[in-house]
């Protein structure tokens, strides 16, 4: 049986069992959960950088968004709070839609 030792989506054990295979899993304590969420976000970010088309890129971005929502909860927030903070920063400092690339700032 292959060993994975990584955080997976909540329904993965159910999906594996539904396919007629067995699996072993555990539920992480909070500290380990945060560590694994961060590792998983790094993994999904690397997968995003390796995508070659828009469809695959959107799949990886959706995975990253799911992880960001989980991390927001860990940091005593919520997806709604995360969006509130994002919107406030966008209003005050702008977003990243205009492709502004800062070269240098004079003294």
Image: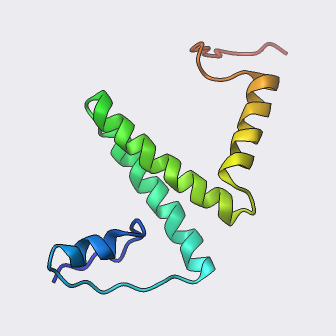
Q: Residue at x 72, y 21 (%)?
A: 94
Q: Quick one: 45 or 22, which is closer to the camera?
A: 22
Whether residue 70 is situated above or below residue 10 in the rendered picture: above
Q: Position of residue 45 (x, y in %)?
A: 43, 47
Q: Position of residue 8 (x, y in %)?
A: 39, 68
Question: Residue 42 versus residue 102: which sits nearer the camera?
Answer: 42
Residue lying furthest front in this view?
18
Counting from the top left corner in percent of width and height, residue 23 is at 25, 83
Quarter holding the C terminus?
A: top right
Seen at 32% across and 76% down, the residue is 13
Residue 23 appears left or right of 65? left
Residue 22 in the image: state x and y as whole percent. Answer: 20, 85
Q: Residue at x 65, y 16 (%)?
A: 102
Rendered image quadrant of residue 77: bottom right
**Quadrant where the N terminus is found in the figure:** bottom left
Q: On the rendered structure, is 23 left or right of 29? A: left
Image coloring type: rainbow
Is 57 drawn above or below residue 91 in the view shown? below
In this rendering, the answer to whether 100 lies above or below 42 is above
Vertical side of 43 occupied by 26: above or below: below
> How many marks overall?
0
Residue at 59% over, 70% down: 34
Question: Is 3 positioned to the left or the right of 57 in the image?
Answer: left
């Amino acid at each position: 049986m292959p060993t994975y030792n990584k955080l997976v989506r909540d329904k993965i054990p159910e999906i594996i069992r539904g396919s007629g295979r067995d699996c072993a899993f555990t539920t992480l304590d909070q500290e380990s959960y945060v560590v694994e969420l961060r590792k998983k976000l790094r993994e999904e970010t690397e997968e995003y950088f390796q995508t070659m088309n828009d469809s695959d890129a959107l799949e990886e971005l959706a995975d990253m968004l799911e992880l960001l929502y989980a991390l927001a909860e860990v940091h005593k927030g919520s997806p709604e709070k995360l969006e509130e903070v994002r919107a406030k920063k966008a209003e005050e400092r702008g977003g990243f839609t205009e492709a502004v690339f800062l070269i240098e700032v004079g003294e």
